[in-house]
Amino acid sequence: MTCTEFIALLDDIIDDSIAAETKAEVEKHMHKCGHCEVVFNTTRKTIEIYRSHQIYDLPNDLRDRLHAAIMARCKKGC
Amino acid sequence: MTTIQQIAGQDEQHPDVALVAQVRAGDVSAYDTLVRKYERQIFRIAQHITQNREDAEDVMQDAFLKAYQKLDQFQGNSKFYTWLVRIAVNESLMRLRKRRTGKMVSIDEDLETEEGTVPRDLADWAPDPEQNYTQSELGQILEKTIKGLPPGFKVVFELRDVQGLSTEDTAEALGLSIPAVKSRLLRARLQLRERLSRYFHKKPGSRHAGPRVARAES
């Protein structure tokens, strides 16, 4: 397996949706290629960080205000 | 964390189906439940696309009002949330076009470029690198990093990786093919990784490591 082939499979590797035999090849490649191992680990970490530190969170006061405005208009038939 | 995938799973008896039926029968309080369930997620999608807080507030309101008015047109063969996302994305793009004085903006934007498909920064990150920053610093880094991505990349990343939607639901919500979603997701992930690397490199004794660049083997 080349690095290019590894990158093409990266999403499937991260999402754990590859066949068992491909998985063995992927692991073999990562074992000998430090760069691809770094790309795999840091991409996985990127997702993890964005998932656990959600940006653009709606503050509760604004949420309540917008929610009330939406429901008031729906009750009036918009 | 609870993801949308968990909330809006593949169950046949999805709770949204009953809520939508109640709203159609005239029960406005059932719509209150749907709005509360999805308002945070819709706001985030709008903010990703418009990059403007006031626009995101307007889009969120307009999307829920439009969905309420058009509920009769909602086909039960798609999930309520994917249908709602589609409305919110269209509203966001319209808002962005107005701001850019009519310039065409779409989810397909910038797809011709091959940028970000080859990892260049191959230096390893510090263990738990986010812990070198305060919550507020980290929030700024994450916002700044994702801001420069094309709208289609940001929304695919948000729906798939942050909210946990399946590839199929993401494709349906955005009106994209499954290969198009996959291609955007890979590029979004790789570009975010590349951009975050400058903040998260392993560099003993320093909180803020500078960018280091290395070339991929091939």
Image (cartoon, rainbow, N blue to C red):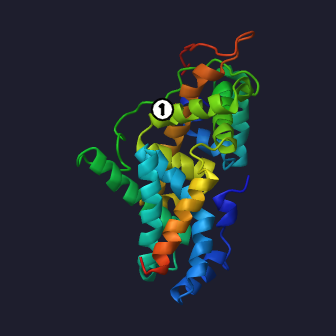
Name the residue at the left extreme.
Answer: B102
Residue B94, percent across and down? 32, 55
- Residue at image position (56%, 53%) is B159
Q: What residue type is labelled 1?
A: Thr
- Residue at image position (56%, 54%) is A62
Q: Can residue B172 be seen in this view?
A: no
**Residue under numbered circle 1:** B117
Residue B111, percent across and down? 37, 41
Disc 1 element = loop
Residue B196, percent across and down? 58, 27
Image position of B58 with respect to B112: above or below: below
- Residue at image position (62%, 73%) is B33
- Residue at image position (73%, 21%) is B126
Residue B45, percent across and down? 50, 52
- The chain identifier of the residue carrying mark 1 reads B
Given residues A18 and B79, the one toward you in this image is B79
Given residues A63 and B111, the one toward you in this image is A63
The image quadrant that residue A26 belongs to is top right
Q: Is residue B195 visible?
A: yes
